[in-house]
Each structure stands twice: as C-alpha cells, then as structure tokens.
Image: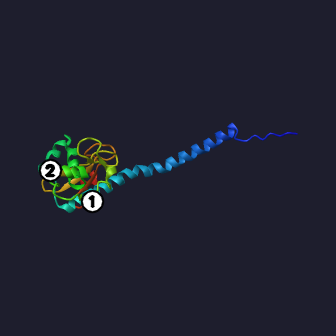
C-alpha cells in the first residue's frame, strides 16, 4: 500500500496565517502612530535649539547687508522668498559646505572650519537646488531666521500645518534660549 504525503499548506491555513499577520500589523500601527506623530516636533525642536544656541554663541546678528559683502557673487544665488533667504544666510555663516567656503570672499584666506559640520546636518539641509542650501525642519519646510529691532532673534518652524504665525509653530527665542510653541510667545 502506497501513501502520499501532502506537503504544504491548504488554502484555509494560508488565509488564517495572512489574517493573523494583518491583525498584528494593525495593532502595531495603532501603537506606533502616536509616537511617530511626536517625533517630528521633537526633531524640529532639537534642530532649532542646536542652531539657535550656535547663533547665540556667536553674538552676531546676521544681516543681509553684511551677507552681501561676505558672500560676494554667492549672494546673488539666494532665494527671492524672504524666509528661505534668511535660512540660506544662516547656513552660509554656520554650516557652509567646502564648495561654498571656497567661493565666498569672507572665507578665502581661512582654512575650512565651519561652526556646525554640514555632514551632521545633512538631513536638515536642502541643497537640491543650484541656490545656496537652507535649513529645513522635520516636515521638510524652510526654517525662518528673524531679527527684531532690539537684536533679539528667532528661529521659526511653521509646524505640522505649514502655515506661519499660528499655534503649532515652533520658535527658538534668543532672549531665553528656549524653543516654544508660538502660542506660548504671545
């Protein structure tokens, strides 16, 4: 008498395994979603704090007038958008690439030594265009560098909604070296 062994799964067994995997994936997604939603604000707050402290440590308010002198011909490659241009100026002074350093009149006679290493911030720099790179937040949006008349500066992220001047914006305030939500600054 000859017996044949059926090796493998039946269709029913396969569907049951797929169903169990689907339930596990759904449970995992529900557990991780709140954590993922908090990671972008945390990453942006950390970036704002790091950059803000670096600017505050320099005790310099980067102005467009000074930037035009220091950058020379590179100043013509900034964005027409004021927020992006302000971020490009920050990158120029804090985190310039070696190529930018070599082209800028202010750096020509000095050895390459940026205040913040561009490699460390490569995920938070946008250098896809031919223009100077700019800082971006965890939502891939431009950071805004703003100086008031007293010399106090702010680093600003538009937050999750991408709209400026509303409650979910994240702001570094140089007066107290902290990052707060816009609602807390009012």
How many residues crowd mark 1 within 10 Å: few (<14), some (14–19), many (20+)?
A: some
Give the number of callouts. 2
Vertical order, 29 against 151 (above or below) = above
Percent coordinates x, y for residue 132 in the rendering: 23, 45
Closer to the camera, 43 or 150?
A: 43
Dot label at residue 67 = 2
How many residues crowd mark 2 within 10 Å: few (<14), some (14–19), many (20+)?
A: some
Q: Which residue is mark 1?
A: 178
User: Coloured how?
Assistant: rainbow
Label 1 or label 2, whichever lies nearer to me, is 2
Residue 54 image-quadrant placement = bottom left
Which one is earlier in the sequence, the residue at label 1 or at label 2? 2
Percent coordinates x, y for residue 178 in the rendering: 27, 59
- Residue reaching furthest right? 1
Point out the image quarter for the N terminus. Answer: top right
Residue 56 seen anywhere in this rendered image of the structure: yes
Residue at the (34%, 46%) spot, across then down = 139
Residue at the (14%, 50%) spot, across then down = 67
Residue at the (19%, 49%) spot, across then down = 103
Residue 174 seen anywhere in this rendered image of the structure: no
Closer to the camera, 116 or 44?
A: 116
SS state under label 2: helix
* Horizontal side of residue 128 vs 57, given as left or right: right
Residue at the (83%, 40%) spot, across then down = 3
How far apart marks 1 and 2 lie (CA) works out to 26 Å
SS state under label 1: strand
Residue 50 image-quadrant placement = bottom left
* Horizontal side of residue 92 vs 12, given as left or right: left
């Amino acid at each position: 008498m000859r017996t044949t062994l059926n090796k493998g799964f039946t269709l029913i067994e396969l569907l049951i395994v797929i169903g169990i995997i689907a339930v596990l994936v759904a449970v995992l997604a529900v557990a991780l979603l709140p954590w993922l939603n908090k990671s972008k604000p945390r990453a942006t707050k950390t970036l704002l704090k790091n950059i803000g402290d670096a600017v505050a440590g320099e005790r310099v308010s980067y102005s467009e007038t000074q930037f035009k002198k220091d950058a020379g011909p590179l100043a013509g490659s900034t964005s027409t958008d004021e927020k992006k241009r302000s971020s490009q100026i920050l990158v120029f002074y804090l985190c310039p690439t070696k190529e930018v350093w070599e082209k800028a009149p202010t750096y020509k006679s000095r050895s390459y030594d940026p205040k913040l290493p561009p490699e460390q911030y490569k995920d938070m720099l946008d250098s896809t265009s031919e223009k100077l790179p700019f800082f971006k937040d965890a939502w891939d949006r431009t950071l805004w560098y703003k100086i008031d008349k007293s010399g106090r500066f702010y680093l600003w992220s538009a937050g999750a909604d991408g709209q400026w001047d509303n409650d979910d914006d994240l702001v570094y305030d140089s007066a107290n070296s902290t990052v707060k939500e816009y609602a807390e600054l009012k």
